[in-house]
Image (cartoon, coloured by chain):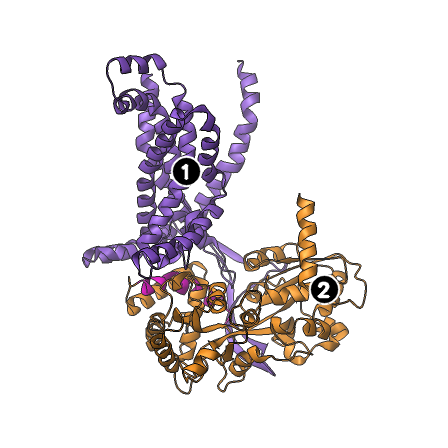
Chain colours: A orange, B purple
Amino acid sequence: MFIKKIALAGAVSLFASGAAVACSYENTVPLKSLTAGFEAWKAVTDAMAACGNFEPELDQEFRTKQPAAFAANPSLYHIGGVSNGTVTPLLNEGTIRPLDDLVAKYGQNLSPNQLIRVDGQIMAIAMMVNTQHMMYRSDIFADLGLEAPATYDDVLAAAEAIKDAGVVDYPLGATMKSGWNLAQDFNNMFLGFGGTFYGDDSMPMVNSEAGINTLEMMQKLAVYMDPEFLVSDSTYVQQQFQQGKIAMANLWASRGGAMNDAAESSVVGKVGSSAAPLAMAGGAPATTLWWDGLVIAANISDEEADAAFRLAMEGLTTDMVQANNDAAIWLVNGYQPSDMAAGAIATATAAPAPAPYPSTSQMGLMHTALGNVLPAFFTGEMSAEDALAAVEDAYKTAAEEAGLL
Amino acid sequence: MKPKVFAMFVGPSVFLMLLFIAAPLISVLVNSFQVTQPIVEVVEVETCTPGFLTQTCVTEVKTVPILDDFGKIQTTTKWVGLQSYANVLELDRVGEAISSGAWGNILQIDFWKALRFTLTFTLITLPFVLGLGLAIAVVVNNATKAVKGPVIFVSLLPFIITPVIGALSIRWLFYGDGIVTVWLEALFMTDISVAANGWAVEFLMMFYRVWHVAPFAFVIFYAGLQTVNQDTLESAIIDGASRWDRLRYVIVPHLMPLIIFITLIHLMDAYRAFEEVVGFSSQSQRITLQWLTYDLLQPDDAGNRAISRASASAMLTMIGIVLILILPLRRTWRDHKGG
């Protein structure tokens, strides 16, 4: 039974990857990787697997496993997939190795943009950027004579017009599932309003004008959403789009490809993308920039690290990108931005540009506090001031326990 | 049995219980009084990350842990007494809410919110589990032989299904454009959003628990029904007792020890409710004590986890279970001594 399942899974994955990418050499060192499980990672690990002796593990819960697995000696995985959010514990604990010499040896295909440097040392190789930006139903916008919204006031105006026209169930979608997603939505808007999360002394600063503005704006937007927005994660919003139930959402660029997937989507070719809207005039787009990339474990032998890095480079080839062009906003040579990528590119190149997600120990605690407390504001149990004060209290308790205050 | 033989039989399980139950419990207890923190330093770090075309480099002040010679994070552990319990209970905020007269504000605090829901959940589902279990058992017992097997099988299904899968399947019936929600919307000609209403989510969570656990009660009661003294039943019929009288005065008293047993098990299980929160994504509306502990233990993106508060929360949950079990346990003890 088990064998049968494995065989079936293998057959399906072979079938799904479509254009199989060949490997230029035979890998002889047994290697393992732990990465997230979305489309782009599947493309990269499939390309690496073509070299043989490689066991990829794709798991959306990788963030909870990775720090402990890499802290083991020898490390349980050789190659790790990280984002700028999840690389922090690995850097703090020193469980990933500097890659400068390996980049010199095998990294001819890498562009300088891909090299993530911490204090001058290359610690990770980025493969793609990701950001939340505006996606909208271009057909509906054209019918109603609307422009792609540049600010959140435009978003509200467009939402009102769409609601009056009654062409979709709900004008807006948003990744506001309580917990990580809701906190991230707050972060986007808060940074758009020029907010600062904590001061130099690590004391929280979210109970500020920017914080209040953020919650008020989110509240105004929520009126146009499915009332069940507190259980709505990225996949849910993507499906709302695909089924034609919403007309706009500030959604992850990595979800763009799914809009034009004829097997799932009823709105193929009808979804346009533009930069993340501004929260206030003269500010940066209300979003954060993310990258996803590869790291190599510190607690493995130099030979293994050498083999692991060489294999990782096989995953980031031009062939791989050309075979999976629409799976992500790739940083790898050979990527041809499609229409769906326009929004992400406009966001990243805006002036002033949005900040990269600020990944620090303090931010981790703040993110958790926001995700746990803010639902009470949206269910109407707390006022904006009370909610933000409660966030600060929760953050302080956690920061004291973590030794940061 | 000779003491030595007895010891040899019991020894392994006592050893395993000490290893897998007592030892972790003690370590959680110790952890709840301690706080372990990394030794940190504040350093300026320059980080270069990709933009779409060119990199952006930022110099930030970051708090990073100091590593020792073996590359492990240096930590300090100190005894903090009841501080972690105070952090979980947040008694100062409770006091504030009481003194300002806004009692409802107590339920904005995670622990009390979780306690309120866990208790309501446990106590409301209990009579339904017992009642439904008994009802199915009586019905099956009176069913004709031909249908008994299939009926038992179907009644047991909810209990066999993995809890999270069961919760998800009920969630899919109701959340978003779930099939039941669509029917209800067509029936009442209105837009219904189940997951946006706390009470509706609470009801679904209880409904799921009763649906899932009633078969367990049914199996136990059904076994109990096979041992009811037929002579007593017959004499009750001769005395003119109705079906209801027979149930009330003969069958239920006979099943009393089993009712207490199921009550005990259900109180223990329901107080540790967890799958419902995950299955119904109810975090924004309703949380349970067990989920609170889990949430504190989950590392965030930066790798922080609140182990001390999680330990305190776990100990409080255990104390809660002991308190809630005292009543039924005292009764069993009395019966035991009396019998």
Q: Is residue B103 above or below residue B58?
A: above
Name which residue type carries label 1: Val
A153 to the left or right of A331:
left
Residue at 72 percent across and 70 percent down: it is A313
* Magenta-drawn stretch contains B30: no
Can the viewer see residue A342?
yes
Quarter containing the C terminus of chain B: top left
Q: What element does badge 2 sit on?
A: helix
Q: Are marks 2 and 1 on the same chain?
A: no
A310 to the left or right of A87:
right
Q: What element does badge 1 sit on?
A: helix
Q: Which residues are magenta?
A: A358-379
Badge 2 local density, few (<14 within 10 Å), some, or many (20+)? many
Q: Is residue B225 above or below residue B86?
A: above
Can the viewer see residue B78?
no
Image quadrant where residue A68 sits: bottom right
Front-most of A338 and B27? A338
Front-most of A401 and B55? B55
Q: Position of residue A132 (x, y in %)?
A: 49, 74
Q: Position of residue B280 (x, y in %)?
A: 42, 53
B272 to the left or right of A346:
left
Residue where numbered disc 2 is placed: A48
Q: Position of residue B319 (x, y in %)?
A: 36, 40
Residue where numbered disc 1 is placed: B213
